[in-house]
C-alpha cells in the first residue's frame, strides 16, 4: 500500500501544471509600512516561473487596487504583474453590473478606484471589503442603516477572513465586520473572493487548466485550503503568516 | 372557549403584582443630546407607582453608570431611583468577582466607574458593552488580540442587542460587535443582561414576586419579550422605540 501510495503521489506530482499562490502570509507579511517579504519567497516565485509551471496569485486583499498591490510586491522584488492576480473587487464589479446593483461602499480608500465604472447613486446594495481604518463606528452605522432601510437587503462581502497578521500584530479581517452587519440585519452576505467556489474557478479558467492539475498554497485553512479542496484542487497550508500566531487556539 | 378565555385573562390581570419596564425605546428615545421622553411615559410611570404595582426598570443600556442614567431620566421628569434599576454591569461585576476574572474592558468611558472595585491588571477575560464611539478599529483589534492570546478565551458581553434607535437614527448595538469578535476568535460570548434568564430572575428577586405575577414591557421582541417569556413571565411589546423602524424587514 505504501508503495502504491508513493507511485500515486509521483504520478500526481507529474500531473501538476499550475500553482495558485495566496499572497499575504505566504509571500509577505503585510503592514502599515507596506510589509516585508517572507524569507525565500522572492526566489520561490522566480523558480516556479522558471520551471514552466503556470502561476496565479490569488488574494483576498482589498486594501488597494490590483495596480497598487502589484507595484508594492514588485518593489519587494517579486516577479508579478496585474494580469496574474485574481482578486475580489473585479469579481464583485462583474456581479454588480450583471444584476444592476448600485453599491454603497464600505471599503479601503485605496480600493475605491476599482469601482470607478460602477454607478453608486441611490444605492440598492452594500459592498464591504477590508476597510481597515475606515471601519469606524460612524461608517459601520451608516452601512447598517443603508442595509436595514432596504426592502430586500443585498449585502456583498469581499471575503470572509477572520483576521490576518500585519507586521505590528493581528488585525480583524472583513469577515468579522461582515458578521456584525449580518447579525444586526438578520441577513446573509454573499461572499466574493476566497473561499467562494466561483473565485477559484475563475482563477483556474484564467490559467487554462483543470482543478486536478492545480495546487493552492496558502496560510488559511478555511479560505485557502478548504475553498480550493471544494473545487477539486489539492491544497497545501504553509506555516508562515497567521499560522504560528494561533497554535494555542487551534493546535 | 372565548368566555373561558376572557375569565382567565381577568383572573390573570388581577394576579399581576409587578411590572418590569424596559427604558430606551419605551420611556424615552436615547440620543447624543441625552434623548427625549416618549409622549405620556412620565405620567405612565407615576400612575403605575400610584396604583401600588411594584415597578422595576430593566435596561441593557451600558453607556453610563446607573447613577448617571437615573439622573438623566429624573431630569426628564421620571420618578426613578438607582435602587429600582436592574442593569448588566453590576451583574457582570458579581460574575467577575466570583470567578476571579480580571477584565480587559471594551465599554463606554462613562461605564468604567461601575468596574472601579475590579482588578483589571493582566487581564484574563474581555468584557464588552455598548462602547459607542469607543468601538474604534484600534480598540476592536486590541480586544481581539487579548482574546486570541488566551489559552481558553473568556468573553463576557453586556447584552446581545442588534441595534437601537437614537434621536439621530439607528445605531449598531453591542450584539453586533460581540458577533464580530466571536467569529474572529471562533468562540461564544457569555451574555449578561437581557435576554439572559439570570438577569430577569434577579429583577424578580429584587421585586420579591414570582414570574407569573409579573409583566415585562419592552420594544425588543428578542431581548425583552422572548427573554421574559422564557422565565415564565408575560410580556408586551410596545410600538415605540425601534419597533416602527423595521416594519419593512420584520413585518
Image: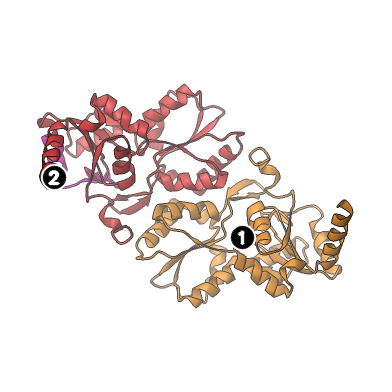
Chain colours: A orange, B red
SS category of the residue bearing label 2: loop
- Residue A34 visible in the shown view: no
Crowding around mark 2 (Cα neighbors within 10 Å: few <14, some 14 to 19, many 20+) is few
Which stretch did the figure color magenta? B27-47
Residue at the far front: name it.
Answer: B1
Q: Which residue is at 45% across, 73% downward?
A: A101
**B231 lies above or below B35:** above
Left or right of B68 on screen, residue B138: right
- Judge whether residue A148 is colored magenta: no
- Residue B221 visible in the shown view: yes
Are discs 2 and 1 less than 8 Å apart at CB?
Answer: no
- Judge whether residue B28 is colored magenta: yes
Q: Which residue is at 56% across, 56% downward?
A: A160
Residue bearing mark 1: A195
Q: Quadrant of the C terminus of chain B?
A: bottom left
Disc 1: which chain?
Answer: A
Amino acid at each position: 500500500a505504501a508503495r502504491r501510495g508513493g507511485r500515486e503521489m509521483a504520478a500526481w506530482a507529474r500531473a501538476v501544471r499550475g500553482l495558485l499562490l495566496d499572497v499575504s502570509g505566504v509571500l509577505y507579511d503585510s503592514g502599515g509600512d507596506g510589509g516585508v517579504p517572507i524569507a525565500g519567497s522572492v526566489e520561490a516565485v522566480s523558480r516556479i516561473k522558471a520551471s514552466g509551471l503556470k502561476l496565479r496569485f490569488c488574494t483576498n486583499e482589498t486594501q488597494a487596487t490590483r495596480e497598487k498591490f502589484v507595484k508594492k510586491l514588485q518593489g519587494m522584488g517579486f516577479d508579478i504583474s496585474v494580469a496574474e492576480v485574481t482578486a475580489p473587487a473585479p469579481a464583485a464589479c462583474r456581479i454588480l453590473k450583471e444584476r444592476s446593483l448600485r453599491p454603497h461602499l464600505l471599503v479601503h480608500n485605496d480600493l475605491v478606484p476599482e469601482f470607478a465604472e460602477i454607478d453608486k447613486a441611490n444605492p440598492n446594495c452594500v459592498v464591504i471589503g477590508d476597510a481597515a481604518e475606515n471601519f469606524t463606528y460612524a461608517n459601520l452605522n451608516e452601512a447598517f442603516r443603508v442595509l436595514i432601510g432596504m426592502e430586500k437587503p443585498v449585502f456583498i462581502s469581499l471575503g470572509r477572513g477572520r483576521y490576518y497578521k500585519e507586521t505590528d500584530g493581528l488585525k480583524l479581517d472583513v469577515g468579522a465586520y461582515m458578521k456584525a452587519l449580518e447579525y444586526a440585519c438578520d441577513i446573509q452576505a454573499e461572499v466574493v473572493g476566497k473561499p467562494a467556489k466561483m473565485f477559484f474557478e475563475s482563477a483556474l479558467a484564467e490559467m487554462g487548466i483543470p482543478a486536478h492539475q492545480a495546487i493552492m498554497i496558502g496560510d488559511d485553512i478555511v479560505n485557502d485550503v478548504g475553498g480550493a479542496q471544494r473545487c477539486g484542487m489539492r491544497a497545501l497550508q504553509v506555516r508562515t503568516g497567521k499560522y504560528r500566531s494561533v497554535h494555542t487556539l487551534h493546535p
